[in-house]
Image: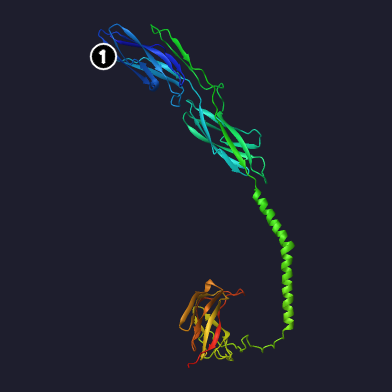
Amino acid sequence: MTTSAELGLPALTVAPGGVATTTLTVRNDLDIVEAYSLEVVGDCAAWTTVEPARVSLYPGTSETVTVRLAPPRSPSSRAGEFPLGIRVLPAEHPELVTVPEATVTVTPFQELQAALAPRRRRGWLRGRYRASVRNLGNAPGTVALTPGQAGEDLRFRVTPERLRLEPGESAELRLQARARKLIWFGKPASWPFEATVGPQEAPGGTEGGGQGTSGTASDGQTPTPAPATAPTALQRPVLEGEFLQLPVFPKWLLALLALLIALLLAWFALVRPAVRSSAKQAAEQAVAVAQQSPTPAAPPAGTPEGGAPTAPAAGSTGSPAKPGSGQPGTGGRTSGPGGLAVPGSGQQGSATIDVQTANGAAATGSYQVPHGKVFDITDIVVANFQGDQGLVTITAGNQTITTIALETFRNQDYHWVTPIQVPEDQAVTASVTCESPGTPASGKQAATCHELLNVSGTLSDIRQGN
């Protein structure tokens, strides 16, 4: 006692998106009534059905059912040969299960999906684009991008030249469009172009189509052909793009250059002669006024603009100055304001403090304000002409003005709108700590540190009490 089942065709061919049918004949060789479940197994199970999927047979009888194959038109329906099996399972005697088999050939088809991004580019000479391509067919293939432009005003380069894509796989091609020459002036030029995406070699110029057959007969042996699926031509995507070539110099720049040239010509032709004439006239008037004014007597030597004589004040080298060292006629190395000031008014003057210090030692130089005077400091200039290393601290009376690292400067100046006032008998002091003597312009390193401090301001009489 057995269960027998036989497929009407041992081999089938079906195209994705099409339908192919065959028959399955089941015979009950048992001595009891048996129900059979019919189930598709194998790679074709996802798109194969059996109608009906269950039959009941009396002993010694048989029944023929229809097997329908309908693979979808998608990359999941891979091209090639695949086994088809129908499992016939008896309900009462499952151990008598049988699986008749056939071979199914899925024909290949080609379908491509492509897009160009961006569609429009702007530039002086070239534009770059990206073409994305996806293989929607069911067989691997090599695709290429073929750009073209009607007027041949553009040259193209595609990288890579070809792509091999598996079913359902996507990739990108890089496209460069380059104009043959620059546009220096004028309006932008628009260059439209097209790029065709297709297989490197189209098989026969058609997509992979196929046809299916079925065997439907009372005895299950004589096949009857099913409607054929007509082959269709491969649709090659055509991508449209545009390159907008810009001029190197826009129109507004030409207008601006013309305006600048016109203004320059107007300056040389009109404005400049008028300015020169006005300046010449003003100079002639100033000369005429100077010739008509009496010439003042020359002031005696050493007399400043205010009329009071100025004499250098005394200073010190390496030590504080003694009281009165800023008076005229002392003959020291530190010079300062001197001379008699008009009561109730100040007189401009300056003092120079010269400090020399041995390596690794410290020294101080100062200028002392004379008794009965007050010194209003407006300017201080510190000179480190050797490039020494160390510190210098400047004080005015009891007030520390600044502390400077010698290596950070060669000449440093300070100016005040509101003067720093130093009372009588107090000093302006420069304290120098020598870490390393520098190298002056002679090119030979000095043996000692040497700094100069110039203090300028107004020396005035102290206003006496009522």
Q: Quadrant of residue 451?
A: bottom right
Residues 109 and 92: in front is 109
Q: Is residue 43 in view from this perspective?
A: no
Residue located at (72% from left, 80% from top) = 289
Residue located at (47% from left, 14% from top) = 227
Task: Specify whether 273 is left or right of 363.
Answer: right
Task: Name the spot of residue 348 as percent of width and height, x first.
Answer: 58, 84
Task: Name the spot of residue 9 as percent of width and height, x first.
Answer: 42, 12
Q: Residues within 10 Å of mark 1 (few under 14, many from 20)?
A: some
Amino acid carrying mark 1 in the image: His
Task: Name the spot of residue 210 as percent of width and height, x first.
Answer: 49, 18
Where is 291 relative to 235, above or below? below
Task: Specify whether 320 is left or right of 102.
Answer: right
**Which quarter of the figure is the N terminus placed in?**
top left
Where is 442 relative to 348, above or below? above
Task: Name the spot of residue 422 as percent of width and height, x first.
Answer: 50, 84
Residue located at (71% from left, 57% from top) = 262
Q: In which quarter of the image is residue 48?
A: top left
Residues 464 and 55: in front is 464
Judging by the rendered image, the residue that carries numbered circle 1 is 93
Residue located at (74% from left, 69% from top) = 277
